[in-house]
Image (tube, coloured by chain):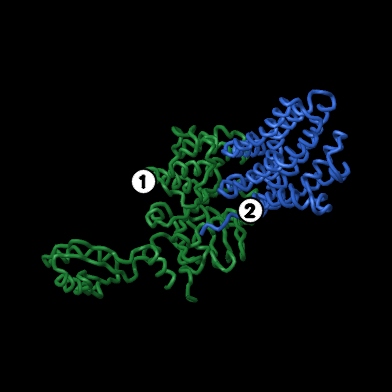
Amino acid sequence: MTDRTPVPVDPTQVTAAARPAPTPAPAIELEHVSRWYGNVVAVNDISFALGPGVTGLLGPNGAGKSTLLNLLAGLLAPSAGAARIDGRPAFGDPSVYRDVGLVPERESVPPYLTGHEFVRLNADLQGMPDAAAATDRAIATVDLAADAHRPLRTYSKGMRQRAKLAAALVHEPRILLLDEPFNGMDPRQRLHMIGLLREMAAAGRVILFSSHILEEVEQLADAVLVVYAGRLAASGDFRSIRRLMTDRPHRFTIRSSDDRALAAALLSEPAVFGAELVDGLLAVRTSDYLAFTRIVAPTARAAGIRLLEVRPTDDSLESVFAYLVRR
Amino acid sequence: MTAFGALVSVTLRGLLGRRRIVLMVVLAGLPVLVGLLIRLGGGRSDAPEILDSLVIRTVLPLIALVIGTSTIGSEIEDGTAVFLLAKPIARWRVALAKLVVAAGLTAALTVPPILITGLLVGGFGGGSVATAFGFALAAMAGGTAYAVAFAALGAITTRALVVGLGYTLLWEGVLAGLLDGTRFLSIRQATLGTAAALTGEDVGVDVLEPVVAAAILVVVIVGGFLLTARALAGFQVRSAD
């Protein structure tokens, strides 16, 4: 496993959107950062720099996403390398929090506070001159006004998540570090939050959020950092990452009215390079995920075969990440 | 509200909002109950010994232990400490706010029972009132030292409750009776020394000199504050991945 190299060589090219003017220091920067716990390496020699825009930190659970965000949030000291916010070390200087809003991964919020009190607490701790107005604004932004005066212990997971987001937004920070921010939100809330974050990115904010869900990253992120087993496996815009993920050998299992005939028909397609019958199922290998999904139905129809089921067999993110790292 | 005020207020609500506060109040009520029984039996002349064994030896360290270890330790444990620490506030200020609350709440829960118990046991004569107030003041100083020490423990280790219990029961309880030298490292002895100086009462053998007692309390309070500030300045979240 020595050949794991991040895909683009120049990490400074990950900037989500074109920066308006050359800035002295990137808003967020990791330079050869490693973090280990005893013998366990959680983050292994990762470098990148980010400017305005939304960047998605994509990776399976346990890949090191939270460790990375905590390093940037100054809640973990790097074992090696440097994590910087606006050129200042992220760890050991609480003044960086003036510019940083943080949604931590852990769900816990003080259960005895109401949503309003919790957001207000964050405004007061930020030393905001008009904390009351800022609190109301942040609560309205995350659409929580109706439940703001209930204790947090009565909140659903999605509501707690929104309360945490409101608390992170209350001082209108330029940099947002969000660890799995959509966890527990229903699709409508998720869509609302995605819209909100996109607006904030368009207004010049720097947003880094982690997710283990490809679709979330696809909908929100301009740029993607793929993390797997503590390494930066790939980085770039979403489309190039998507291509990396789809331009690899894929396997599908198919059930149809005539598997044998369908196998013969599919083998004549250039995108298909293998088909075999295993345990009464047709297993097909293809080099081109998208092309295959386009041709499978017409091919079956032309041969007069009815498709009962087409299922990708190794499309778990885990296998995708493992593939990216092996490249 | 100022950031410091917000820290004090949320810490206080955190401590009062937990169910263990009921236990604390019950604990604080015990000496009063005993005092009431003694009063019904006609009162006694050995109020200092009763206050020592009922409050200084047991209730005071236990209340300070639970409050002190919850003040910072519980928030680190449940992850909510991040909301206080990821803010543009010098960490020593956070430490100070937490310690002020821990000490204040410990005093609020121990001073009234001492006054009431002292008066119930010794009656309302001038000497008895002086004894009760002397012990109350000493308990405020000693309780602050206990609360600060235990809060510092909570900031440093996840086993603060166990370590604190071990200190109170084994070090101050058992070893103090066997090894004379431990009294110089005992908050209880320093509290008793302070009480003796304030009341002029004889509170037992080998009582610490007032200056030594006061110095011990000051060292514990200042040292505890510095340790807490340092622990919070170097705060790191536990591994999540």
Q: Position of residue B240 (x, y in %)?
A: 52, 57
Q: State the image quarter where residue B11 is shown.
A: top right
In this rendered view, identify the residue nearer to me: B33 or A68.
B33
The quarter of the picture where the N terminus of chain B appears is: top right
Residue under label 2: B159
Q: Position of residue B9 (x, y in %)?
A: 63, 35
Q: Chain of mark 2?
A: B
In this rendered view, identify the residue nearer to me: B228 or A287.
B228
Q: Position of residue B123 (x, y in %)?
A: 78, 25
Q: Chain of mark 1?
A: A
Q: Residue furthest left?
A: A304
Left or right of B189: which side holds B16?
left
Above or below for A313 versus B176: below
In this rendered view, identify the residue nearer to me: B54 or B228.
B54
The answer to whether marks 1 and 2 sit on the same chain is no
Q: State the image quarter where residue A290 is shown.
A: bottom left
Chain letter for the blue colouring in the rendering? B
Give the label on residue A187, or none. Answer: 1
Query: Secondary structure under badge 2?
Result: loop
- Give me the residue at 40% from left, 64% from top: A318
Of the two numbered discs 1 and 2 in the rendering, the one whose residue sits closer to the viewer? 2
Q: Is residue B173 visible?
A: yes
Chain letter for the green colouring in the rendering? A
- Total marks in image: 2
Above or below for A261 versus B97: below
Query: Secondary structure under badge 1?
Result: helix
- Give me the residue at 31% from left, 69% from top: A250
- Which residue type does callout 1 highlight? Pro
Distance from Cα at disc 1 to Cα at disc 2: 42 Å
